[in-house]
Amino acid sequence: MKKLIPFVILLLISMDVLQAQGNRPIFEEMPGMVSYTYRDSFSKDVAATLDTLQAMGIKDMEFSNLFGTTAAEIRKLLDERDMYCSSFGVGYPDLVNKTQEVAANAKTLGAKFVRVAWIPHESPFDLADAKKAISDFNKAGKILKEEHGLTFCYHNHGYEFYPYEDGTLFDYMTEETDPEYVSYEIDILWTFFPGEDPAALINKYPDRFKLMHLKDLKKGVDGNMSGGTPKENDVVLGTGQLDLPAILKAAKAAGIEHYYIEDESPVYYKQVPRSIEYLQGLTY
């Protein structure tokens, strides 16, 4: 009987350890926010919108619009609220034709990343579109990195996953862009929508993805490679089709640096708090 006591104690300790491991959070930090989620509110009052986000506990912002103000004015408003901008999103033409201005605005905002989310093209996206983007991204990315210390990221939008050779056009772009100058922001909805597995894609290119857009797709919605779907199909994280735990585990293992909620739904203001609650409740 006395010999069994140490065994029982060890068994209980092991069970406690396993239980503790099962309650470890997957996503420990407060997510960031894409300004596009609150675009209607930002368009009316930048300061008041930042107040709303600050009250929710948001600190990390990705601005993809200056909303009629200047980078300096937004930086001042962020500093006053102990918030910061880590990524600055711009349009493809500005990246190519106004690289220096883009860099100046990004640095004024305090951003470390410059992001483009759409490649102009006629559907379907094809090899010629991919080759032009590769050339432009490598050129602009080199300027941003070498002259300004900024990292360029391309945000996938779904249309890049047409088959090409043994993979997809996205694979081709990833292989042909210089990793020294071109990184990626994975939008998990726009990876899943055309039929890809976001977690598998992160695992395939663990060193290329630096940023992530967190969003979920309404159940029952079929995807395609158009790069578009009704905004109502953006739903609260964890209530849609994406396997968020698997995606976030892959992202954490890959060392993705910033996570931003992007919710295009008309009722984003109702959904965002629920999405944050979901993220903070995820455990291993």
Image (cartoon, helix red, strand yellow):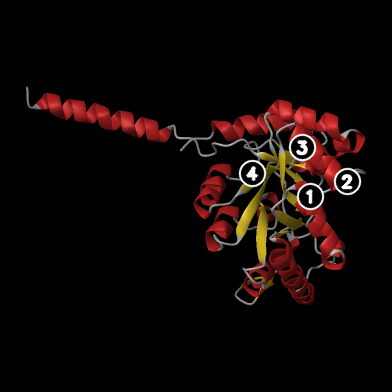
Give how far across and how far down residue 183 sits, in percent: 65, 62
Q: Nearer the viewer, residue 142 or 208?
A: 142
- Residue 78 bears which disc, if any? 3
Which residue position holds label 4? 241
Which residue position holds label 1? 108
Which residue is pictured at 69% across the width and 33% down the height? 58
The quadrant in which residue 169 appears is bottom right
| Amino acid beneath label 4 | Gln
| Amino acid beneath label 2 | Thr
Of badges 3 and 4, the one in the foreground is: 3
- Residue 70 bears which disc, if any? 2
Residue 231 shown left or right of residue 20 in the figure: right
Contact between labelled residues 4 and 1, with CB atoms less than 8 Å apart: no
- Separation of residues labelled 3 and 4 (CA atoms): 34 Å
| Amino acid beneath label 3 | Leu
Give how far across and how far down residue 118 sits, in percent: 80, 59
Contact between labelled residues 4 and 3, with CB atoms less than 8 Å apart: no
- Mark 2: which secondary structure? loop
